[in-house]
Amino acid sequence: MRHWQTLMFVVLSFTLLILIWQSTIWIGDYPEALLPSPWMVLLGIISLIADGTMFEHVRISLFRFFSGYITAALAAIILGLILGRSKIMWRLVEPIVQVVRPVAPVAWSPFIVLWFGIGNMPAIVIIFIAAFFPVLLSTVSAVKKIDRTYLKLAENLEISQTSLLWKIILPAAFPYIANGLHIAVGTAWIFLVAGEMIGAQSGLGYLIVDARNALDLDLVLAGIVFIGLLGLLLDKSLGLVEKRIGKVWGRQEAVE
């Protein structure tokens, strides 16, 4: 019953969006060359699906996204666990992190293109930078917030460092790390599109730029629709993985 209610609200939400979209065209008297109607965009989506163009761009974009995101998440979690356990190291590294973190990943694009050329790598590197810092900061904060009683008990019981990591630190820090992973999904997906607009000849970002240059605004909006839908699916998929891990580690608050 709950799933049906969720589906109903999703359908109502998108129906409302389409009505607002179409009403804007009618009220503003916009020509379809300036603001394509939902029907034109639907036809554009169908044409891109029919000739396989959309699936090819989606495949390439997802490959770049997962390559950069997973690499960034693993590196950030490992480094965050180390820095969170060492106050001295974190005090040394934190100023650097706080200076570099606010810089938009696309600001590094001139150097990234020079160092890695064009193709997949620039987009992957931009995604890595976008995803790395949210996960790193969440992990460090999570480790520092762990109840010291657990750590002292583990020390008294002479638990090995490996067991301490897998049985105490990671399960206790997991809900906070998961928040960082959720934030990183959004930022990385946004900058994937930006990265593909800069140094790529394929992917959803390139599809939008190419359609814009050809003044095919219906295809521009078609690409935007797919970007939004894929972003939603990625976020929901991460939520399912989070629930599964939360059940394994017995963190019920993480799965509710």
Image (cartoon, helix red, strand yellow):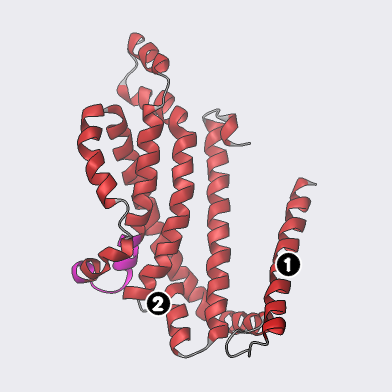
Q: Which mark is residue 39?
A: none
Which amino acid, mark 1?
Answer: Leu
Q: Is residue 66 visible?
A: yes
- Residue at horizontal 46 percent and vertical 73 percent from the top: 204
Q: Amino acid at mark 2?
A: Ser
Q: Residues within 10 Å of mark 1 (few under 14, many from 20)?
A: few
Q: Is residue 160 left or right of residue 18?
A: left
**Closer to us: 15 or 67:** 15
Q: Which residues are magenta?
A: 114-126
Asked if 72 appears above or below 173 in the picture, the reply is below
Q: Position of residue 9 (x, y in %)?
A: 74, 56
211, above or below 74, in the image: below
User: Can residue 121 be found in the magenta stretch?
Assistant: yes
Front residue of this view, candidates 5 and 12? 12
- Look at the image and tell me whether residue 52 can be seen: no
Residue 49, compared with residue 65, is above or below; it is below
- In terms of image quadrants, where is residue 21? bottom right
Structural distance between the alpha carbons of marks 1 and 2: 32 Å
Which one is earlier in the sequence, the residue at label 1 or at label 2? 1
Residue under the image location 27 percent in, 68 percent down: 109
Disc assigned to residue 16: 1
The vertical placement of 234 against 149, above or below, is below
Say whether residue 127 is left or right of residue 245. Answer: left
Identify residue for label 2.
Answer: 202
- Residue 75 lies in the magenta-colored region: no
The residue depicted at 74 percent of the width and 62 percent of the height is: 11
- Regarding mark 1 in the picture, which secondary structure is present there? helix
Q: Nearer the viewer, mark 1 or mark 2?
A: 1
List x then y, in percent, for residue 144.
36, 28
> Total of numbered circles in the picture?
2
